[in-house]
Image (cartoon, rainbow, N blue to C red):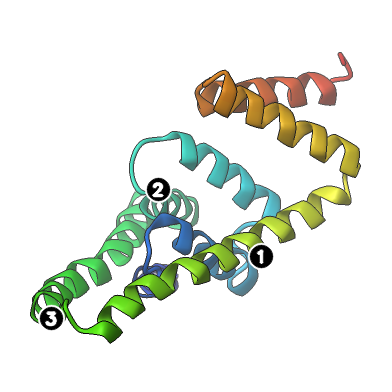
Amino acid sequence: MHFKIFWSFFKVGMLGYGGGPSSIPLVHKEVVDTYKWMTDEEFQDALAIGNVLPGPIATKLAGYIGYLQKGWLGLANAVFATILPTIILMIILLKLFTEFKDLGWVQGMSHGVMPVVGVMLFILTYEFLAKAKGRTTWQFLILFTLVAFVLLAVLEIHPAIIILLIVGFSLLRKEGRI
């Protein structure tokens, strides 16, 4: 199990070029689709909580999932596996990039990453919405998105407060109080 944890998050660290947003679909693929350590709903919850905590999302998800699988040793294993490729690659690539940064193909490669990350995030969002649609209506999803946008962007309310309100609302609804 420790090897599976290490290998899963090592791959995420190796292939997650572009930061946290590009790592999220890779983590999802490994823990939900490949190893089935979590359901989509559990991953969505972990992602939501991880997004309000400070620090890189990939290491937060790795630590949490590693802890769920094998306790504190699993946490350390997953976090180390996530950051090890970055450490190795940063040492190598920094040296190479400083030598070849003015070449056109290097600059083009840097600019080509952004559309790929955007497509990966769109696909993940679409899959989450498709699963949510099975439990609710499009009207609710659109209203929820608009309300969340107003709370976050217009009123500048911290995401943690919004998540706590949603969790509280869900618990009250589940108990039949709403």
Rendered view: 163 above or below 103: above
Of the residues shown, which amino acid type is indicated by label 2? Lys
- Residue 105: quarter of image: bottom left
Image mark for residue 96: 3
Residue extending farthest to the top is 177
| Mark sitting earlier along the chain (2/3) | 2
Residue at the (62%, 57%) spot, across then down: 38
Label 1 Cα neighbours within 10 Å, binned few <14 / some 14-19 / many ≥20: few
Of the residues shown, which amino acid type is indicated by label 3? Leu
Judged by depth in the image, the label closer to the viewer, 2 or 3, is: 3
Give the Cα separation between the discs numbered 2 and 3: 29 Å
Residue 63 falls left or right of residue 169: left
Give the Cα separation between the discs numbered 1 and 3: 33 Å
Give the quadrant of the C terminus: top right
Of the residues shown, which amino acid type is indicated by label 1? Ile
Q: Which residue is mark 1?
A: 123
| Mark sitting earlier along the chain (1/3) | 3
Which x, y percent locates residue 136?
89, 41
Disc 1 on helix, strand or loop?
A: helix
Rendered view: 6 above or below 156: below
Label 3 Cα neighbours within 10 Å, binned few <14 / some 14-19 / many ≥20: few
Rendered view: 157 above or below 142: above
Give the quadrant of the N terminus: bottom left
Q: Are marks 1 and 2 in contact (CB under 8 Å)?
A: no
Q: Which residue is mark 2?
A: 60
| Mark sitting earlier along the chain (1/2) | 2
Which x, y percent locates residue 107?
28, 76
In this rendered view, identify the residue nearer to me: 148 or 29. 148
Res. 3 in view? no
Residue at the (83%, 26%) spot, across then down: 174
